[in-house]
Amino acid sequence: MSTPINEYLTPQEASYIAHNAYFTLKDWISGQPTIGMETRANVRKMVTGDGLGAAAQGGGANTSLKPTELGGAHLDRVFAGSTAGVTTGFGYVLSFNRAGSKQVVIATRGTRAEHSKADLLTDLRASMTGFGDFGLVHQGFRNTFDSVKIGLTRDDRRIMDADVVHCVGHSLGGAVATLVAAHFSSRGKAVKLYTFGCPRVGALGAQSAMEQSLGKHNIFRVSHDLDPVTMVGPYPYGHLNGQPDDANNMMLVSPTGQLLSVANHDMTEYVRSVGGTEMNWQAVRGLGGAVERDNAVLARWLLRSSDNPGWLTQRAAQGLSYLMKAFSHLLKQLGFVTIAGLTGIDLFCVVLASNMTKIAEMNSQLMDCILQAARWARVVVSNAAQLTATVIRAILNAMFSVLRPIAVNALQSVGRGTPLPLLIGGATALAGALIG
Amino acid sequence: MERDAFEHLYLHAHTLAEFGFMRAMAGLASSDAPALAPEQLAANAADAQQMLNLDAASFDWSALDGVAGFGAGPAADENPVAGHDGPTFTEALAMDDEVGGDAMPELSNYLERAQAARPLLAGRIAHSWATVDAQALDGALAALPGELAPLTGPLSADELAPWLALYEQRHPALDTLVQQIRRLEPF
C-alpha cells in the first residue's frame, strides 16, 4: 500500500512529534518534571528549536523537528489535560503548510511515572462510557479527552480551517489522540491518526465505528510486539486497525528481542525503531514482517519477571504460555483465525461472553485444552457437561493470579529514568499475543 | 506429618501439576486437529468475526462477573502474593539462555530447580502448612499406590516420573492429593 507524500506525516515526523509531546510537562527538559505545564518558549525550543536537552531525555536522540520538513512549523499552543483530577501540560498544536495545504498537528503525551501516579490511575480505570455516536470507550481516556478538548477550544477555528488534521500520541497520548481524531473526524475534518504503543481505547464496535469515520488507511498504528501496554484492556476492548492483516497495523520487533519488557513501551525506543531519516511507512510495514508472532515469548518474560521468586510460580507462567499457544493453535486449525489473534486472557473472555464451550464440544483437543486449564486452575472437571462459566472464570482468575503480581511489581518499581512501567487496567490482558 | 515431609510433598505436588500441565499443553500445541470441510471452516471464521464484533446492546456483561477486573472480581493492585526480589531484567536475560527459552524443560532440570527454590518458597509453604487439613491429607496419602517412592521424601526425576505418568492418566487418588495441596495456595 503506497502512501501519498505530503498528505501524511512521515514516520520520523510522527515519532518525533509524539516524543516531543512529553516536553509539555513542566520541567521535563530538566529531567525532573513536576506537575504543571511547560512554558511555550521551552516547548518550542524542543519541538522546532534546537532541541538541546532532548538528547539526554531521548536516549541520545534529538527529536526536534528542525532538520525535517516541519522545521518551519508554527507552535500554536501548549495545552493542558487532566488525568484523575491532576492537570498538567498534555500536548501542543502545531500548524504548517505543505504542498499548498493547511495542516495542523495535535500532539498528546503519554503517561509518565516520575511524578504523576494520577496518570497511572487513569490507565487503571478500565470502565466504559459512551463517546458520541461511536459507542463505548475507556472511561479514563474519555475523561482525559474531555479535559484536552477544553484546552483545544481556542484552537478550534484553526483546526477546523485546516485541510488536514494530524493527531499523534504515544501510550495514553495515543488513546487520547484516537478520541481527538474521532472527534474532529465526526465534525467532517480529514484526519490522520498516528499512535505508538497505544492501549485499547474502544469496545463493542466503537473501534470499528472510529475506523469507518477516519478511514482505515488514515490510521497508523505502530507497536512493538512485546509492548505490554498495547495489551491493556481485555476483550471486548479492541484496537483500531488491530487485525493481523490490517495494512497499517504495524507491529515491529521489540528492542528487547523476544522478551516482554516495559522498555518496549518507551517512546524513545519507538523513535529508534521508526525515526530514521530514510524511513517511510512502507518500510515500517516491512519491518512488521520480521515479527515472530508467537505468544510464547510473552509469557517467557512472565517466567523471568515474576516478583514471586519461586521456581514453581515462574514455571506457572510458562505453563500459561503453553496454554495460550495450544489454544491458539487449535483455534486456528478450526478456522477461528480472527480470535486466535487475541491474547490468552482475551480468549477466555471470549469463551465466557460467547458461550464458546459449544465450540469446544465439537473438537476433543480444544475441549482437552480447556479441561487441562481447569485442572491447572484447581477445578476438577471431567467432562464437557461440567464445563460451566464458573470453571472458565476460575481459569481466568488463576491466570490473573500469576500475572497480577508482575503488573503490581512493575507499577511499584517505577523510578526516575526507568522506562514506563507495565500498566494493568482492570482485567489487563498481559497473557500474550496469540497472533500466529 | 512432619514439616519436612510436607515440604517434599508440596514441591512434588506442584511439580506434577505444573510440569504435567506444561507437557499436556505442549502436546496439544503440536497436535493436528481433524481436517474440517471448507464450509465448516468458513462458518467458524464467520463466527469468530461475529465474536469480535459484538455490539453493546447484545453484549452480556454478566458473563464476565466475578472475573478479575470485571464486576466483583479482585482489583488489579490487590494482594500481591510476594515480595519484589525476583530476577532483574538482566538476570532474566541470562536465565533465558540457561533454561533454553521456551523449550520444554526436562523433568530432572525442573525438579532440581523446584528443590533449589525451596527457601524462596518458604512463605508459601508455611502458609500451606498452617492451613492444611492434616487428617484429610493423611487420608489422601493412604489412597496412593504403595509401590512407588513416597512423595513425602526426596525424589529423583526417575522416581518422580512414574508419579507424573499416573497424574497424566488422571489417577483419582493422586489427582485428589495434588488438588488438595494446590488449593492451599493463597490465590
Image (cartoon, coloured by chain):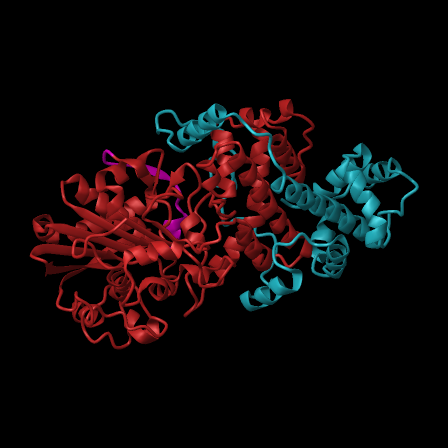
Q: Is residue A132 magenta?
A: yes
Residue A68 position (above or below residue A204): below
Residue A345 location, x and y as percent?
Answer: 51, 41
Near-viewer residue (A32 or A163): A163
Tell me where the magenta segment starts and ends, as one range.
A119-133
Determine if residue A208 is in view: yes
Relative vertical location of residue B47 with respect to residue B28 in this rendering, above or below: above
In this view, the residue in front, B37 or A226, is: B37
Q: Position of residue A183 (x, y in %)?
A: 20, 43
Q: Residue furthest toward the right?
A: B147
Colour in which chain A is drawn? red
Q: Residue at x 75, y 38 (%)?
A: B168
Q: Residue A173: x percent and y percent?
A: 30, 54
Left/right of residue B60 with respect to residue A37 in the rendered view: right
Q: Nearer the viewer, residue A71 or A128?
A: A71
Residue A359 part of the magenta segment = no
Q: Colour of chain B?
A: cyan
Is B102 situated left or right of B39 in this image?
Answer: right
Q: Residue furthest top?
A: A385
| A48 over B8 or under it: above or below | below
**Residue B82 at x, y = what percent?**
61, 56
Q: Quadrant of residue A372?
A: top right
